[in-house]
Image (cartoon, rainbow, N blue to C red):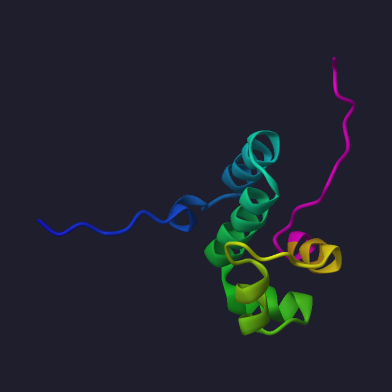
Amino acid sequence: METSKFDIADYLDSKEMIAEYLNTVLEEGNNSDIINAIGHVAKSIGMTRIAEETGLSRPSLYKALSDGSKPQFETIMKVLKAIGGQIQINPINS
């Protein structure tokens, strides 16, 4: 039996699923997890499309959103806008 590698990007097929995924990672993950998650979403939408919308090259996007990378905040904001997301601040209930 042949198996294939699980790729979350294959399951991010709606705006609702993307939002749920990113919000879960924001709540539970660390900086690296969040960058990787944004990369998964960008991959699910299409890196070529994201590159066109952000003005960044595909290789730059792959590098910026890869494991262990530390992209500039401006890059993250461009990618979030291109994938149809935004950052929203809510008060933390203690």
Q: Nearer the viewer, residue 85 or 94?
A: 94
Q: Residue 35, how many percent across, how many down?
A: 66, 57
Give the total of numbered labels: 0
Location of residue 48 with respect to 72 vertically, above or below: below
State the quadrant of the C terminus.
top right
Q: Quadrant of residue 93?
A: top right
Q: Is residue 61 left or right of residue 40?
A: right
Q: Which residue is pictured at 86% across the width and 24% down the height?
A: 92
Q: Residue furthest left?
A: 1
Q: Nearer the viewer, residue 1 or 17?
A: 1
Q: Which residue is pictured at 68% across the width and 85% down the height?
A: 57
Location of residue 79 with respect to 3 vertically, above or below: below
| Magenta residues, start to end | 80-94
Q: Residue 81, how many percent across, how many down?
A: 79, 61
Q: Is residue 11 left or right of residue 22?
A: left
Q: Which residue is pictured at 68% across the width and 71% down the height?
A: 64
In the image, is residue 92 part of the stretch drawn in magenta?
Answer: yes
Q: Residue furthest front?
A: 68
Q: Quadrant of residue 10?
A: bottom left
Q: Residue furthest top?
A: 94
State the quadrant of the N terminus.
bottom left
Q: Residue 87, how many percent across, how many down?
A: 83, 47
Q: Quadrant of residue 56?
A: bottom right
Q: Nearer the viewer, residue 79 or 65?
A: 65
In the image, is residue 25 part of the stretch drawn in magenta?
Answer: no
Q: Is residue 52 left or right of residue 10?
A: right
Q: Is residue 46 left or right of residue 77?
A: left
Q: Which residue is pictured at 63% across the width and 82% down the height?
A: 58
Q: Residue 78, how many percent across, how many down?
A: 80, 67
| Dominant secondary-structure state across the stretch colored magenta | loop
